[in-house]
Amino acid sequence: MQYREDIVAACKDAANAHPNDIEAAVKQAFDKIRKARNYAEFVDQLAFEAVRNCVYDCRHTANVQLRRQNGNYGGPAKVESSKSQSVQSVSAFLYAYFIAGRTLGTILGEELPAIADSEEKRAEGHRFNANLCRALASLVSEGKTVQQCVNPRKLKRIWDSVT
């Protein structure tokens, strides 16, 4: 969603004023935005985007459930960190990276698995969908549907090869 410049400026100012307190930043930005011109139009855009996100979440949940039922679901992420002195010194600034509404350096260890799961689920779904579409693209003619061009047995083989 593209936001107006005044909305983005209010959020940026608040984020900079409260880098480790998301609630304070949100309150500051919200207080300023509430007084902005065309506030009702902005609220309508947000509501529409919230409904869109809910639809995406519902589709994602159904897709994950279907993949699990077929025994085709990815495992946990494999993360390997380097112990190089130069990499450590260069990456020190990364603690300021924002994820899950916080700076990375302030996230507690017990919060990391849930954040990772949330991010990974979303990414896995998008990756699977992209690979499936690429595999089907050469088989489905313009103006035709997948169901018209790919029989169920072939679709199952493609599905299994993508996962």
Image (tube, rainbow, N blue to C red):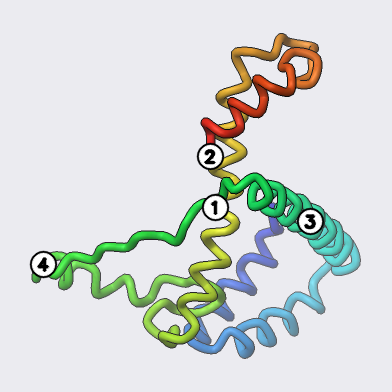
Q: From what the image shows, is residue 49 above or below residue 127? A: below
Q: Position of residue 24 (x, y in %)?
A: 62, 90
Cα separation between marks 2 and 3: 20 Å
Q: CA distance from mark 1 to mark 4?
A: 28 Å
Q: Earlier in the sequence, mark 1 or mark 4?
A: 4
Q: Residue at x 32, y 63 (%)?
A: 79
Residue 105 is left or right of residue 127, and the answer is left
- Residue that label 3 marks: 58
Q: Amino acid at mark 3?
A: Cys
Q: Nearer the viewer, residue 124 or 20?
A: 124
The disc placed on residue 84 is 4
Residue 23's place in the image compared with 150, above or below, is: below
* Amino acid on which the number 1 mark rests in the picture: Ala
The type of residue carrying mark 2 is Thr
Instruction: Please state which of residues 11 and 46 is positioned toward the viewer in this rendering.
Output: 46
Q: How far across and how far down the image is residue 158, in percent?
A: 59, 26
Location of residue 90 in the rendering, given as x and y in whole percent from the top left corner: 19, 67
How far apart are the alpha carbons under marks 4 and 2? 34 Å
Instruction: Check contact, mark 2 vs mark 1: CB within 8 A.
Output: no
Is 155 on the left-hand or right-hand side of 97? right
Which circle marks residue 123 in the picture? Answer: 1
Lower position in the chain sequence, tag 2 or tag 1:
1
Q: Earlier in the sequence, mark 3 or mark 4?
A: 3
Tell me the element at label 1: helix
Q: What is the distance, in whole Å, between disc 2 and disc 1 at their CAs?
A: 14 Å
In-front residue for pair 9/116 = 116
